[in-house]
Structures are given as C-alpha cells and as structure tokens.
Image (cartoon, rainbow, N blue to C red):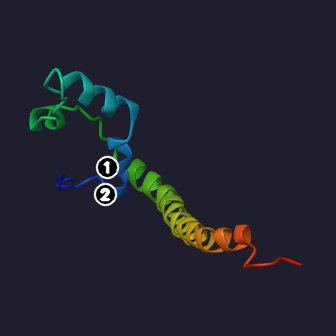
Amino acid sequence: MVTNKSQFLDNETLFLIFRSKAYRLHILNNSKGSTVKMITKDAVESFELFVPPSDIIEKFESAEKPLTAKLRSSEVEIQSMIKLRDILLPKLMSGKLKIK
C-alpha cells in the first residue's frame, strides 16, 4: 500500500505518475528476483520526480479532475451495461425474449 505524503500532488495525479511509462520502466529495472519479480520499497522510493511549481500543478489538477470524474462515471455505466447484457443476451438467444 502506498500512502500519499505529498504536500504538492493529489492522489489522482500520483496515480497518473504511477501509471506512466517512465515509472513502470524504473520499477521493472529496479525489481528483484529472477523467476518472480518483486517490487522493493527502495525501488518505489528511488524514483526521482520533478515537481513543477504549484501554479502549474493547480492548473493540471483543475483540468484533470473533470476528466477523472468522467472516466469513473463511464466505468460505472459500462459495468451497468455489462450486467444488462449478461441478463438479456441468454434470454434473447434462447427465444424467451422477442424483439419486435
């Protein structure tokens, strides 16, 4: 578990950093083990990150927050549609449900 102790970055921004290609490559290059790769605490803590001035961070976060909210909303809608498909498709295929 990672706890955000940053005074500068919110959880969503930190999440985007963790999903970045640079971070993933850093973790892969610093993981231990030959058969099963393990991520060490040192690998996580040794990632160097340039933190821009706070006004730039605020602009980024104000643009990012609505996008993240829309993404979460879309994920909920997708899950709802998947459930509906899983209910209706078998009935349609079996002939229990007819569409005019």
| Residue at 32%, 26% in the rendered image | 25
Instruction: Please give left or right for residue 69 compared with residue 81 in the image.
Output: left
Mark 1 Cα-neighbour bin, 10 Å: few <14, some 14–19, many ≥20 = some
Q: Is residue 26 left or right of residue 93?
A: left
| Along the viewing direction, whichever of 72 and 34 lies nearer the viewer | 34
| 1 and 2 marks in contact (CB < 8 Å) | yes
Tag shown at residue 14: 1
Image coordinates of residue 27 in percent, x first then y, are 24, 30
Q: Position of residue 100 (x, y in %)?
A: 89, 78
Q: Where 93 falls versus 14 (above or below)?
A: below
Give amino acid for label 1: Leu
Q: Is residue 76 left or right of residue 61?
A: right
Mark 1 falls on what kind of element?
A: helix
Looking at this view, name the residue that lies furthest to the right: 100
Residue ID at (64%, 69%): 90
**Rendering coords of residue 54 (x, y %):** 34, 51
Residue ID for mark 2: 11
Q: Quadrant of residue 19?
A: top left
Q: Secondary structure at mark 2?
A: helix
Occupied quadrant, residue 22? top left
Q: Residues within 10 Å of mark 2 (few under 14, many from 20)?
A: few
Residue 54, visible in the rendered structure: no
* Residue 45 relative to residue 50: left or right: left
* Residue 62 image position (x, y, % from top left): 47, 60
The vertical placement of 24 against 19, above or below, is above
Real-space CA distance between mark 1 and mark 2, rounded to the nearest whole angstrom: 5 Å
Q: Amino acid at mark 2?
A: Asn
- Residue 65, compared with residue 51, is above or below; it is below
Q: Is residue 39 visible?
A: yes
Residue 94's quadrant in the figure? bottom right
**Residue at x-position 31% and y-position 57%:** 11
For the residue pair 65 and 57, the one nearer the viewer reads as 65
